Amino acid sequence: MAEPHRVLSPFADGPVLAIETSCDETSAAVVQGLSVRSNVVASQADLHRKWGGVVPEAAARAHVEAIVPVIDEALAAAGVCLEDIRAVAVTNRPGLVGALSVGVTAAKGLAFARQIPLIGVHHLEGHILSPLAEFPDLDFPHVCLLVSGGHTEVIEVAAPGRYQILGSTRDDAAGEAFDKGARLLGLGYPGGKAIQDAAETGRPGRYRLPRALKGEGSFDMSFSGLKTAVLRLVESEQDRIDVPGAAAELQAAIVDVLMDRGVRAVESAGVAALTLVGGVAANRSLRERLAVEAERRGWRFYTPSLSMCTDNAAMIGIAGSLRLGAGERSGFDLDTLANDDLPR
Ligand code: KG4
Ligand code: ZN
């Protein structure tokens, strides 16, 4: 983004329709300025459950079915019609290209038909800026802990549009560690909530799982060793396994690592605010422990409500509104990308 990112200047011409189809949620939202007027999410979790993970081809086809009804519902819930929409924001990267193409094609069609601006949004920028919907006075600079099923990043956010990645996972994302662990423990898909629920009645420490790279100077993380360790535990304990105990230890192992990186990053960046975003930010233990730590250290801590943590179009609308407000526009040749660095 050009100069205006020092000042928050969201798109001021009227409602923005936002569309998100990067993975397994079909979502549409209406955002005005930074305020969310509607946010509709059709989850494909039931569809992918039988395969234990997201099947890209099936995800794309499910988006094709859901996209128009979801857009219709988002417009109705916001009390607007298509003629009221002044711009369209859409996730175009990174993600499953077949899935992204459905949202991008719908967005282009609408923007072309109505002759209104189109803006392609980086999915992670949507997550990073998602707290603005509920905390418009969010402090910049801050550190963002972005934890989802596809990404695990520690980012210094100088201003909207100005990001520096301090650390990332070297292998699996934190959400993947929850999902794979849940599958091995027979707890179903998606695994994060299932592990959290099972952990309620378990005690961490009965089993010992690794906290990789802890104590190292870097902010990088590694979660793939956890999956192997859970597999070994399941093989050695067999029927005797204490599932709540294993779930509690798995959750504690993941949360310990995320806490360590988040806390050290805030201190090392010399900022006084931390945001926690992405699907794994829905984890109660992680939210509570970070809130306590922030209070103890005198920082501000922001985490969106659960519906803004998991994938949704409202966060794409917030990021899109800021980019549009800074004068950015995408052409009708906007492409989809499986991978792309965060804009800087
Ligand atoms: O952000 P998201 O909806 O999609 C991606 O962009 O990946 O994140 C989905 C991830 C899944 O791995 C899911 O297991 C995890 O978020 N998740 C949780 C919880 N709720 C969802 N992980 C831990 N605890 C939760 N309560
Ligand atoms: Zn996401």
Image (spheres, rainbow, N blue to C red):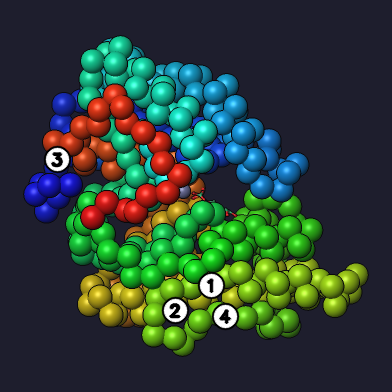
- The structure residue drawn at horizontal position 84% and vertical position 73%, both measured from the top left corner, is 235
Q: Nearer the viewer, residue 27 or 90?
A: 90
> Which amino acid type corresponds to the residue marked 3 in the rendered image?
Ala
Among all residues in the image, which is located at the extreme right? Answer: 239
- Considering the image in quadrants, where does the C terminus appear? bottom left
- Of marks 4 and 3, which one's residue comes earlier in the chain? 4
Find disc 3 in the rendering and name its residue. 326
* Earlier residue among tags 2 and 3: 2
Q: Which residue is mark 2?
A: 260
Q: Compared with residue 125, is residue 44 higher up or lower down, i.e. above or below?
A: above
Instruction: Please report whichever mark, 2 or 1, sits nearer to the chain's N-terminal start.
Output: 1
Mark 4 lies on a secondary structure that is: loop
For mark 1, give the secondary structure.
loop
Looking at marks 3 and 1 on the same chain, the residue that comes earlier in the sequence is marked by: 1
Decide if ligand 1 comes within 8 Å of the CB at mark 1. Answer: no
Tags 2 and 1 touching, CB below 8 Å: no
Distance, label 4 to label 1, CA atoms, is 8 Å
> For the residue with label 3, is its CB less than 8 Å from the closest atom of ligand 2?
no
For mark 4, what is the residue? 211
Residue visible at 34% across and 54% down in the picture = 341
> Could one spot residue 89 in this view of the protein?
no
What is the three-letter code of the residue carrying label 4? Arg
